[in-house]
Structures are given as C-alpha cells and as structure tokens.
Image (spheres, helix red, strand yellow):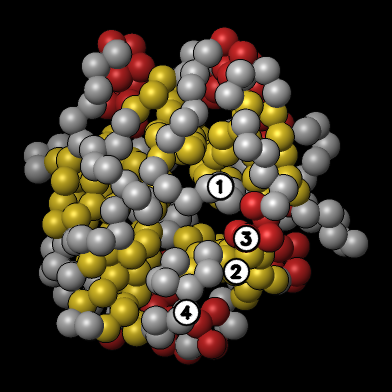
Amino acid sequence: MQGLPPAGIICFGISKTGVDSHLVYIEPTDRISTAADIAAMCGIFSKAEVFGFLLGDHNYASFFSSMENGVMISVWDKGFKTDKYSDITYKSFCDAIFDEDGKVRGSDSTTLLLLSRQGERILCANLNGGMDQITEIMSPVNLGFPTFGVVARKIILTAQMDNNQVYAISVNKIIQTIKTGDLPRWEVRSLLVDQVEDISLPVDESGTTVVITAVKYGRRLLFPAVVLPDLTNGLRITLCIGHSVTEIQRTDPAPQRIDVAANFVVARQNNGGPNRLHITTIEKYATGNASFIAMIDRATSGDFSRAIA
C-alpha cells in the first residue's frame, strides 16, 4: 500500500478470517496522484468487470472517510466481522490512504469511494484515525441498496433509495457508541420528494452542501441541499428549489462525488441499468447539462432558492 496513489484504488477487502487483505487498483500510463489527474483521465468502470477480480472469501468496503475528533468510518459488505486481525489490516489501510489531517493523500477530500458487492451494508467506526478497535454500527433500516454521504466531517447521511426518508447520525453519537457499546439513535428526516436515489459528497468548501438525486412528480431531479446540525431542533436539511434544481434523464448516472476545484464528477448508475462508476468532467456530466454546472456554481456560492424542507 505504501506509495500507491489512493486515487487509483478501486476495491479494498479483508478476508473473512481477518488475516489477509485484497486490493484492486488502476495502473494507468500516467501516474494518478491528485483529483485533477482523475478528471483528466475520465472513463467508465463496470462493476461486472471489477467483480471478476473480487475474492469469494473476502468482504469489501465501499466507503472510507475521516471525521472530526479522530473518528474513522467505513461501510462494508454485511458479512464483515471485526476482530484483532481485521483491526490491524484496517489501521494499515487508513495509515496508507489518509494523511495526518485526515485527507486522502494527494487530495482535498476526506473520503475515498470504492466499489464493492451490491447488497446490504454494515457501517463501522473507530477512534484515533483507525488505531482503536472497530465498532459495528448498524444502519437504522434494511438497506438493500444504500447510499452514504459525510457532511462537514460531522454527520453521516444514508438513504434507502426507495422512499423519501434520510437517516443521519452525528460524530458525537458515534463516539458515544464506541465508548458505551449502545447503538445510537438515528435522526430521520422526510424530504418533500417521492424517492431519494443518491447523496453526493459535499460540493462546497464548508462541507455542508450536498447534491441529492431524487424523483419528484415523476421527474428525476438534482437538488442542492444544505445539511446542518441544529442544537435546538437536531439535524436540519434544506432542499433548494426553483432555478437551482436540474432535471436529468433516467439513463444519466447520479453524482456521488463532485470536486468543483478539480472539475470532475464521480457518478454511479443505479437506476435499473448496469452498475457502473463514471469518472468525467463537470462539463461532460449528464450529457453536458449547462444548468447542472450553473446549479453547482450557485450551491458553492450560497445563492439558494426558497427552502421547502
């Protein structure tokens, strides 16, 4: 792992015995070291193609992210089990991909997205940047096709993709769970849409604005949404509508990560077609939809339309 650019990693798994690990990565002709390198590369990776490399006796991660106060979270195949061997492998992986500030090496992002098998997930967390024992934190619903996002290094969001509810948990509740072993109480918010499909990673510098892909009135829309902790009312999610909302086609992939500074989008196609990971520029995303580019500009500038949730 040491010296391997994290941007090139596609899959990472730990064996069911906890002793071995398995990593699948891209080895392009031009070295990948930054988000800008990914944007320049562009491409489409089919899960079916990647699955040919996955090992049957391993569980794979779909998500690694660093949060506040030394908390590290990851999302795994449901069969993932924690033990001392897994802890050691987990720590080695975290040391290799994150720098001392908790950012993915060579990037401003605190999250590494990976491909893993489709199905239910288990959320894991630990303290001290991956050094302490891993704690399993079960999701609040049976997530057959879950989507996860991290906001401002403070909040984890997850949705089931077949209803309008979003579940959230704060980093403080995760720390409490790690220390006491008691499963946390997730906060539930119903958004004024028919169905949530996906949640992107933050698109602004403050890390509080995400793009939610949702269906409303039969239309598939991209909503900028501001996610903030509220000491009085708990979590507050504000959907931004009006001219900020962009319609995309059913065949267009939903954005998982949007890196405005590096001008690239990582998007997942999960609407009935083959599961693919798309890496492209903002201009080429969603067939060059100009209104999407304008929406991102407004989302990052704070110029929002009327709030509806």
Q: Residue at x 62, y 60 (%)?
A: 48
Tell me which amino acid carries mark 1. Ser
Quadrant of the rendered image containing residue 210: bottom left
Which residue appears at 19% of the width and 61% of the height?
164
Give the vertical position of 222 relative to 172 (above or below): below
Taking depth in this image into account, of 83 and 124 the one nearest to the observer is 83
Q: Which residue is mark 1?
A: 116
Residue on which disc 4 sits: 252
Horizontal relation, residue 24 to residue 287: left or right = right
Residue 278: assigned label: 2
Q: Earlier in the sequence, mark 4 or mark 3?
A: 3
Q: CA distance from mark 1 to mark 2?
A: 15 Å
Task: Decide: is 204 above or below 66.
Answer: below
The alpha-carbon separation of the residues under discs 3 and 1 comes to 11 Å
| Residue 272 as seen in the image, left or right of residue 112 | left
| Label 1 or label 2, whichever comes before in sequence order | 1
Name which residue type carries label 2: His
Quadrant location of the N terminus in the rendered image: top right
Name the disc covering residue 48, or none.
Answer: 3
Q: Secondary structure at mark 1?
A: loop
Coordinates of residue 185 in the picture (x, y in percent): 18, 30
Picture coordinates of residue 231, whole percent (x, y): 15, 37
Alpha carbon separation for disc pair 4 and 3: 19 Å
- Compared to residue 201, the image places residue 294 above or below, namely below
Q: Is residue 273 left or right of residue 299?
A: right
Q: Are marks 3 and 1 in contact (CB under 8 Å)?
A: no
Up/down of 80 relative to 234, above or below: above
